[in-house]
Structure formats: structure tokens, C-alpha cells
């Protein structure tokens, strides 16, 4: 059997490994952590830093094709692996996704609207920021996730203090937009250029972290879905992208669509596809890598996905506890996914709960019951 390799051993890698194993593939994971969620379930685990030459060679020795599950895996590591094996997505495509300034420039090149913004790389650029970008959100150009590396800035004084607080690294200042709601779209693109898309998903974030995803998107329309998928397909094609790609969008109060950012991999907002669709985002990532046909996925059940953060593992007094899974699993349509992480921390993604239903209202109703049982704020 072919062996599929993954850079990164987190939960995305773990779910990729599960999908690869379903098709009889062997799997190899490179991750520095001996107890990474994906390393624990893969056939082979190369325990090494991402740029470690011996580790990269060991992965290339074992794997016939290689992908990444970790947004910030050094693009250079992917380029080195590509000298020996097919790598998807490419280091060049991942490099664009890793840099907010390059990412926004790429969206604009593809005719996809973005938030008004300025790149702040030095004092001169800071001084030249136009007033109409404030109030804004200052974001480090690289390495941010889950709202980390971001500061809301109301005025120039806050902007200057915020840039200092972020270490004066290259940042993007975005105008704070009036969001009506947020959506994401996940596409998969094959080596032959064929693109298939999952339905539009509506996302609720809390404290900068995805909390709830609902599909079909309650506030979506067929026209909005077609527009988002069209944007994603153009963005992928222009990058020569191979594999699964997620684009996050803001829908503004006037109904217009603005691209926020993209992730060069399966995405948290698509985890429900394992249970709600006939093909999951991980199935399509496996197919894209192995050069197998990308069939169009079909949503067979309306669904709500709840992210399970480490906070749920602590009671009001701060004592560690295990959430009452038995109560949750008694609910109809509940599919619990736990990532096998050894210790819970606040804000850490420990698992997700997918609730499917016969109708959107039924899925939502059950998801609200699950949220109440777990101590997740209603949505
Ligand atoms: P992720 O974990 O999705 O990669 P991230 O740290 O890269 O998150 P963003 O997606 O840029 O962060 O922003 C996080 C959230 O902050 C958004 O989903 C949105 O709710 C809010 N937000 C970000 N930028 C803006 C903006 N320009 N105007 C209004 N709200 C914003
Ligand atoms: Mg991000
Ligand atoms: Mg985001």
C-alpha cells in the first residue's frame, strides 16, 4: 500500500490518518511531540522538528506523497520534501497562506474583496496609516491563530502601543468591519484542476476561537453560497493549489462578502463533514494526495458542530473534571470526537461534537441541549 505522510501531528493530522486508513493506506506523521494526536494513531511517527534535515529525510524515505495539517509548518520544509516526493499543497501556496499581507494581495489579484487594510513593517508605515482604518484590528502578518497575535485598536495611540506590544513585527492593520455573520467554504482541488466544494457553513467565534458551526448556513442564500464557492475556486486555481483549502468570509451588514483569511488544509469549521456528508474534508484530502477522483460531497444531514475547548474540563472552582459524555451521547444524532490530548488547558481544542438532525431546527434543538449539558453558552 502507498504511505501518505503528514507534516504535523495535531487533531487535523489525526482525522486525516483515520481517512487514509479507511482506504487502506499506510500513514507517517512528522511531529516533535512524542504524544501528538496523529502520531499516536499513524503507522509511523517521525519525532523531529519541522526543519530537522534527518527528520525530513526520514519522512521522505517512508512516505510516497506528503501533505501538511499544521498551518505554520515552515514552507521551506515542504519545499525540501518536494525535491523527493509529491507534496500537496505546495510550499509556495502554503507560504502565501502564512502571510496575511501576501494572502490579502492574492485575494485582490483574484478579484475577491478584502477589508480595507495597511501593512505595517516599519515606523514610516505606522505613521502613514490613514485615519479611516481606525478603529481597527492589528494582526501579526505571520503565525497568528485563534485570535492570538491580534489587538483591537481604537485610535492612533492604541495602534502605536499595540504595535509595540506585538514586538514591532510586520503587521496588518484591518479596519473593523460591521459583521452581520461569518461563513466559511471548503473546496478540494485535484492535480487535474477539478474543484469540488462543500456547502456554505456559518461560524460563530467566541474570544477569537471558533465555537459553533451550522450547516446549512442559517443566514446564507444560494447566491451567497455560489459567490463564496466561486471566490474559493478562483483563489485555489490561481495558486495552482492541490488539496483541501478553506476560505473564511465576513458577511457585512449590507450583505456584501469580504474574504478574511484562508487555511491551506482541512479546517475546524469542516469537522462536521465526517458525520454530515457522504465524503468528509479528510476523505477529499486523501483523494487529492493519492491522485484519486474528487467526487462532489453531499450534505445528507443538517448539522451543528460544537468545539470542545479545554475550559469544559474545569468546574467553576477550577477543579479538573471529565465532562458528562454519557449524557451527551444519549442525545439523538450526537457524534463525539475526542483528539486524545493528554492534558486540558483553557482554550485548547480537545475535541468536537457533531449533532446531526432530520431538519436544521432539530439539529439546533439537540445541539442546544448538548451545550446546556456541557456548560457551553447557548448560541
Ligand atoms: P483562526 O484561528 O481562524 O486562524 P485568526 O487568529 O487567524 O483565527 P482572524 O480569523 O483573522 O484570526 O480573526 C478572528 C475573528 O476576529 C474573526 O473570525 C472575526 O470574528 C473577528 N475579526 C477579525 N478581523 C475582523 C475585522 N476586520 N472586522 C471585524 N471583525 C474581525
Ligand atoms: Mg487564521
Ligand atoms: Mg480566522
Image (cartoon, grey):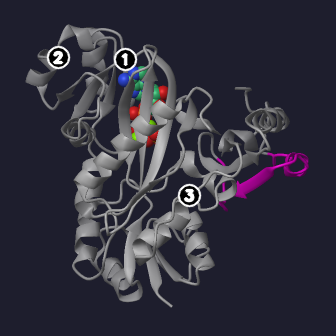
Quarter of the view holding residue 139: top left
Callout 1: few (<14), some (14-19), or many (20+) C-alpha neighbours within 10 Å? some
Image location of residue 11, percent across then percent down:
57, 59
Left or right of residue 245: residue 215: right
Q: Residue 325: within the magenta? A: yes
Residue 47, position as x, y percentages in the image:
45, 75
**What label does residue 176 carry, if any?**
1
Q: In the rendered image, which residue does mark 3 sit on?
A: 297
User: Which residues are the magenta region?
Assistant: 321-344
Could you tell which of marks 2 and 1 lies nearer the N-terminus?
2
Q: Position of residue 333 (x, y in %)?
A: 81, 49
Helix, strand or loop under label 3: loop
Give the Cα distance between marks 2 and 1.
14 Å
Name the one closer to the observer, 345 or 250. Answer: 250
- Rounded to the nearest whole Å, what is the CA distance between mark 3 and mark 1? 34 Å
Q: Which quadrant holds residue 297?
A: bottom right
Q: Residues within 10 Å of mark 2 (few under 14, many from 20)?
A: some
Amino acid at each position: 500500500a502507498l504511505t501518505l505522510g503528514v507534516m504535523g501531528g495535531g487533531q487535523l493530522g489525526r482525522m486525516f490518518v483515520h481517512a487514509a486508513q479507511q482506504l487502506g493506506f499506510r500513514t507517517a506523521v512528522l511531529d516533535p511531540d512524542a504524544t501528538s494526536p496523529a502520531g499516536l494513531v499513524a503507522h509511523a511517527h517521525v519525532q523531529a522538528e519541522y526543519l530537522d534535515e534527518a527528520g525530513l529525510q526520514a519522512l521522505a524515505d517512508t512516505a510516497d506523497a506528503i501533505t501538511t495539517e499544521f498551518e505554520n509548518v515552515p514552507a521551506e520544509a515542504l519545499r525540501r520534501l518536494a525535491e523527493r516526493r509529491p507534496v500537496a499543497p505546495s510550499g509556495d501556496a502554503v507560504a502565501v497562506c502564512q502571510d496575511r499581507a501576501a494572502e490579502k494581495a492574492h485575494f485582490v489579484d483574484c478579484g475577491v474583496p478584502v477589508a480595507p487594510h495597511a501593512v505595517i513593517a516599519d515606523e514610516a508605515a505606522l505613521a502613514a496609516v490613514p485615519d479611516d482604518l481606525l478603529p481597527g484590528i492589528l494582526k501579526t502578518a505571520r503565525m497568528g491563530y485563534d485570535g492570538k497575535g491580534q489587538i483591537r485598536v481604537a485610535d492612533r495611540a492604541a495602534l502605536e502601543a499595540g504595535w509595540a506590544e506585538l514586538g514591532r513585527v510586520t503587521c496588518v492593520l484591518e479596519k473593523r468591519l460591521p459583521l452581520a455573520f461569518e461563513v466559511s467554504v471548503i473546496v478540494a482541488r485535484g492535480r487535474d484542476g477539478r474543484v469540488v466544494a462543500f456547502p456554505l457553513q456559518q461560524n460563530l467565534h467566541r474570544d477569537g476561537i471558533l465555537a459553533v458551526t451550522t450547516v446549512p448556513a442559517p443566514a446564507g442564500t444560494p447566491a451567497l453560497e455560489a459567490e463564496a464557492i466561486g471566490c474559493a475556486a478562483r483563489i485555489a486555481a490561481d495558486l495552482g493549489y492541490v488539496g483541501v483549502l478553506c476560505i473564511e468570509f465576513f458577511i457585512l451588514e449590507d450583505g456584501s462578502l469580504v474574504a478574511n483569511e484562508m487555511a491551506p488544509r482541512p479546517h475546524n469549521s469542516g469537522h462536521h463533514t465526517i458525520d454530515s456528508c457522504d465524503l468528509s474534508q479528510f476523505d477529499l484530502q486523501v483523494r487529492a494526495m493519492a491522485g484519486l477522483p474528487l467526487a462532489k460531497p453531499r450534505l445528507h444531514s443538517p448539522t451543528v458542530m460544537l468545539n470542545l475547548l479545554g475550559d469544559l474540563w474545569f468546574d467553576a472552582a477550577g477543579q479538573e473534571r471529565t465532562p458528562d459524555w454519557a449524557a451527551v451521547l444519549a442525545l439523538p444524532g450526537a457524534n463525539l470526537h475526542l483528539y486524545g490530548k493528554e492534558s486540558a488547558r483553557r482554550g485548547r481544542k480537545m475535541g468536537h461534537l457533531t449533532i446531526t438532525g432530520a431538519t436544521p431546527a432539530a439539529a439546533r434543538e439537540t445541539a442546544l441541549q448538548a451545550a446546556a449539558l456541557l456548560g457551553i453558552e447557548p448560541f
